[in-house]
């Protein structure tokens, strides 16, 4: 759940969401860097009290010292995650070297592609930090199968909608899992040229 845009409503939203999902479902929140460090520390406690186990980008991902501070001082059981804006392997390396995250995010559509995602996975493995793949689930699944310390793959419904619109070979989740089609080559996707044509730009 996104948090931090309207902080005055977030305690109520946490309660409504928890009531909807029940007590046994893991509850993750994403602040997209909305907080200053001091605010983030206070909210980390609020989230932990609400049974949240995963806090994404409590401060800006550029603030590696701030992320480290949160990671060191957040309540036990609340994982600090960031990294979806890593555009090069060096960005991932810097975040890991700073000890900034409990879970390292990587987005295969931003980080330099499948080869770089796999390299980021190796960095994470070496440092004992799990990797969470950020969105674009259909194109991430096959690459994620080569990541040994994979935590999870973020399943974003607007990405899913676009992937289904533009590609054949997208996957249906089964019990929370996405399983690659081993009969398909590569990432298993084929561009639906007819569907894509209406979005073509001239020139
Ligand atoms: Mg995010």
Image (cartoon, grey):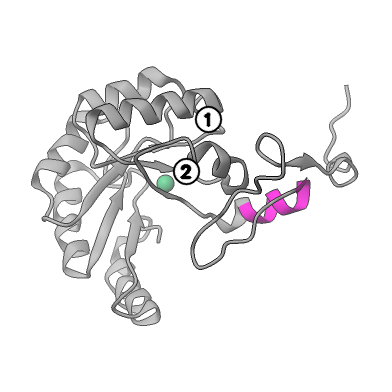
Q: Which residues are magenta?
A: 160-168
Please state if 159 lies on the left or on the right of 177 as rendered. Answer: right
**Occupied quadrant, residue 53:** bottom left
- Figure check: 65 above or below 175: above
For the C terminus, give its image quadrant: top right
Q: Is mark 2 within 8 Å of ligand 1?
A: yes
Q: Quadrant of the N terminus?
A: bottom left
Tell me the quarter of the picture where residue 130 sits: top left
Residue at image coords 16%, 42%: 71
Q: Is residue 173 visible?
A: yes
Q: Mark 1 = which residue?
A: 110
SS under mark 1: loop
Residue 70, horizontal then vertical, whole percent = 16, 43
Q: Closer to the N terminus: mark 2 or mark 1?
A: 1
Q: Residues within 10 Å of mark 2 (few under 14, many from 20)?
A: many
User: Which percent across, then down, holds residue 12?
Assistant: 31, 75
Look at mark 2 in the image and give the residue it sits on.
134
Relative to residue 77, is residue 85 depicted above or below?
above
**How far from the left and from the top, in percent, is residue 132?**
39, 43
Residue contact between numbered discs 2 and 1, judged by CB atoms under 8 Å: yes
């Amino acid at each position: 759940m996104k948090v931090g845009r309207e902080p005055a409503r977030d305690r109520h939203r946490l309660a409504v969401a928890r009531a909807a999902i029940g007590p046994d479902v893991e509850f993750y929140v994403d602040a997209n860097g909305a907080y200053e460090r001091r605010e983030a520390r206070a909210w980390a406690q609020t989230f932990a009290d609400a049974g949240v186990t995963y806090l994404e980008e409590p401060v800006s991902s550029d603030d590696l010292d701030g992320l480290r501070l949160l990671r060191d001082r957040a309540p036990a059981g609340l994982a600090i995650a960031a990294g979806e804006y890593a555009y090069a392997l060096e960005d991932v390396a810097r975040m890991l070297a700073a000890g900034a995250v409990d879970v390292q995010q990587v987005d295969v559509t931003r980080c330099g592609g499948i080869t770089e995602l796999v390299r980021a996975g190796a960095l994470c493995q070496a440092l004992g930090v799990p990797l969470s793949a950020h969105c674009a689930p259909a194109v991430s699944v096959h690459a994620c199968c080569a990541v040994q310390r994979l935590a999870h793959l973020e399943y974003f419904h607007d990405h899913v909608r676009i992937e289904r619109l533009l590609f054949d070979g997208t996957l249906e989740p089964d019990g929370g899992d996405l399983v690659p089609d081993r009969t398909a080559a590569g990432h298993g996707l084929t561009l639906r040229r007819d569907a894509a044509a209406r979005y073509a730009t001239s020139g």
